[in-house]
Image (cartoon, rainbow, N blue to C red):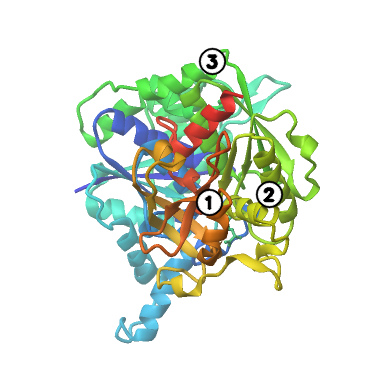
């Protein structure tokens, strides 16, 4: 049986529960334990796919094509694990399941209630088998939220059922610092822990977010009010880079706190992978500037995985990454004068698309390393069709009705796996021998994740290839172009998929690694 760690939060939102949960996983892994992570979001949306990136940051996509919140990205990157639709569960989905069961008559006429019907459903999701030593479950929101109450009740019951020693309750709070008196205030933490207790949950370990390390006195004081030994009061220090958090926890012996709780032997772990990132962050390195031509810049986290993937590739290449945000709607080639590489990321809708096409053209004509992601591949193909093949009516049917539809919805390819009409999740791609794509991946068959509606129209393959564009990746059935490149160019490559969802800080992703390597050589 797996052991469970439930991570809740209090005082304020956005304290970094996801990063804390992932860091606990990293500590367990470094001691040889296997981990799985789940996120429970009490809100009523049935899944995050319909939530605006303007509110929630990017929509992350799993291999099985589920659109999830971006915390799942942290988990996959930090821990090198693959998650699926059972690992991102919202309140809306729980109620949806329960109400559907009620309509089907599954409850045989019983009165359907929060306890036991909703709580049982939540516990079912918690208990989906994972074959790992540990399952870390993050409960979204903050203690005291109305939506969250039934989730707290469920984890309370769950702990009672599987045994209190098989479950650890970790709680994340904030200790605000009062500048004038120079004091770190512990009262909000005490109140938050008490709130949790009102729900029958005694926190086993506290992670207190604070701008400096808590003193032994402060830890003892919090412990006294919260029924905990002082050593179980851990500082979750503000850091300039989230990858330092596992080290901050390791220095405070957090693994041994968990080991003591679960009755496991104490152990020290190999943190060298994460220490390497810390060393990279401290080193004095040459700057590599990447221009991202996009349009979601005013939303924090809208390009979360993309920024991460570029950062990971910079670690691999020993350069200091500088991202230049170039607004596609106001694109001016001069914006690119000081960049070492141009990247056009994914995007939806016509706003800014002509600027993105102009950016692909600029990179192509000036031999500047170019990487296109999803829409970034589509605009590269549109530019090529217009300005090299010479058909200036070429466009995507997403943006123009009467055009040469070099990008189109390829209806015969719409399989049942297309949630709504989007092609979502992992698809295989066959790579053509002798291409840059083959060199980059060092493989002839890859799997990457998708989230788009339109495709390069295979009917224009000959026109594109006769004029020097190579379709270097194809769906195995030979119908959907998945990668393109221009062999006469220094580095010009694009994919219909989102490679950023599969990057990690320890080895990067082959496409990003080689893009940064090409840009670095500039
Ligand atoms: N809007 C384009 C499509 O739907 C590209 C989507 C994307 O970049 N993710 O095909």
Please give the label number shown on residue 282. Answer: 3
Q: Does residue 5 lie above or below 253 as drawn?
A: below
Residue at 70% of width from left, 73% of height from top?
401
Residue at 29 percent of width and 26 percent of height: 256
Give how far apart the Cα atoms at labels 1 and 3 are.
Answer: 34 Å
Cα–Cα span, label 2 and label 3: 30 Å
Ligand 1 appears in which quadrant?
bottom right
Foreground mark, 1 or 3, reads: 3
Q: Tag 1, which secondary structure?
A: loop
Asked whether residue 288 is in view, the answer is yes
10 Å crowding of disc 2: few (<14), some (14-19), many (20+): some
Mark 1 = which residue? 141
Q: Does the residue labelled 3 lie within 8 Å of ligand 1?
A: no
Which one is nearer the viewer's eye here, 439 or 214? Answer: 439
Residue density around tag 1, few if under 14, some if 14–19, many if 20 or more, within 10 Å: many
Q: What residue does disc 2 label?
A: 296
Residue 104 placement: quadrant = bottom left
Q: Nearer the viewer, mark 1 or mark 2?
A: 2
Please identify the quarter of the rendering in which residue 4 is found. Answer: top left
Image location (x, y in percent) of residue 222:
48, 29
Q: Nearer the viewer, residue 463 or 229?
A: 463
* Sequence-first tag of 1 and 3: 1
> Can you say which quadrant of the picture contains the C terminus?
top right
Q: In this view, does 421 lie above or below 59?
A: below
Find residue 309 and report its horizontal and vertical position in percent: 51, 37
x, y percentage for residue 455? 53, 62
- Note whether 362 is above or below 238 in the view shown: below
The answer to whether 403 appears left or right of 444 in the picture is right
Whichever of labels 1 and 2 marks the residue nearer the N terminus, that label is 1
Q: 357 or 387: nearer the eye?
A: 387
- For label 1, being within 8 Å of ligand 1 is answered no
- Determine the residue positioned at 23% across, 42% down: 133
């Amino acid at each position: 049986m797996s052991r469970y760690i439930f991570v809740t939060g209090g005082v304020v939102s956005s304290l970094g529960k996801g990063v804390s949960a992932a860091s606990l996983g990293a500590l367990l892994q470094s001691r040889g334990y296997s981990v799985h992570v789940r996120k429970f979001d009490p809100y009523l949306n049935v899944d995050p796919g319909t939530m605006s990136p303007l509110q929630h940051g990017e929509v992350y996509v799993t291999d099985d094509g589920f659109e999830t919140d971006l915390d799942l990205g942290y988990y996959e990157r930090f821990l090198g694990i693959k998650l699926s639709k059972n690992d991102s569960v919202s309140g809306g989905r729980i109620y949806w399941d329960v109400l559907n069961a009620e309509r089907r008559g599954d409850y045989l006429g019983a009165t359907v209630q929060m306890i036991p019907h909703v709580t049982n459903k939540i516990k079912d999701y918690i208990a989906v088998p994972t074959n790992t030593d540990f399952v870390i479950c993050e409960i979204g929101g903050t203690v005291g939220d109305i939506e969250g109450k039934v989730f707290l009740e469920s984890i309370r019951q769950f702990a009672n059922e599987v045994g209190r020693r098989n479950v650890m309750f970790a709680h994340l709070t904030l200790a605000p610092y009062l500048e004038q008196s120079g004091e770190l205030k512990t009262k909000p933490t005490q109140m938050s822990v008490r709130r949790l207790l009102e729900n029958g949950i005694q926190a086993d370990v506290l992670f207190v977010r604070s701008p400096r390390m808590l003193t032994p006195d402060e830890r003892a004081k919090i412990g006294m009010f919260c029924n905990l030994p002082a050593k179980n009061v851990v500082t979750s220090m503000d850091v300039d880079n989230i990858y330092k958090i596992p080290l901050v926890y390791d220095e405070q012996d957090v693994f041994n706190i968990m080991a003591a709780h679960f009755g496991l032997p104490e152990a020290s772990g190999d943190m060298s992978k994460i220490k390497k990132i810390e060393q990279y962050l401290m080193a004095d390195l040459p700057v590599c500037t990447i221009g991202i031509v996009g349009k979601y810049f005013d939303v924090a986290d809208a390009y979360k995985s993309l920024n991460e993937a570029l950062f990971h590739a910079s670690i691999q290449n020993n350069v200091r990454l500088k991202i230049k945000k170039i607004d596609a709607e106001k694109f001016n080639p001069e914006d690119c004068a000081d960049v070492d590489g141009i990247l056009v990321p994914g995007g939806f809708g016509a706003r800014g698309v002509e600027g993105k096409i102009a950016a692909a053209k600029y990179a192509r004509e000036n031999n500047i390393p170019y990487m296109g992601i999803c829409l970034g591949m589509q605009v590269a193909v549109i530019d090529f069709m217009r300005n090299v093949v010479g058909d200036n009516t070429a466009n995507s049917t997403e943006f123009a009705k009467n055009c040469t539809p070099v990008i189109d919805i390829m209806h015969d390819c719409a399989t049942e796996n297309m949630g709504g009409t989007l092609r979502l999740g992992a698809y295989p791609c066959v790579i053509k021998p002798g291409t840059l794509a083959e060199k980059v991946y060092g493989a002839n068959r890859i799997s990457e994740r998708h989230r788009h509606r339109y495709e390069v129209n295979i009917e224009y393959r000959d026109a594109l290839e006769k004029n020097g564009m190579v379709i270097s990746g194809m769906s195995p059935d030979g119908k959907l172009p998945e990668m393109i490149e221009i062999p006469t160019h220094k580095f010009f490559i694009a994919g219909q998929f989102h490679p950023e969802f599969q990057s990690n800080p320890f080895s990067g992703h082959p496409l990003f690694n080689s893009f940064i390597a090409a840009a670095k050589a500039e």
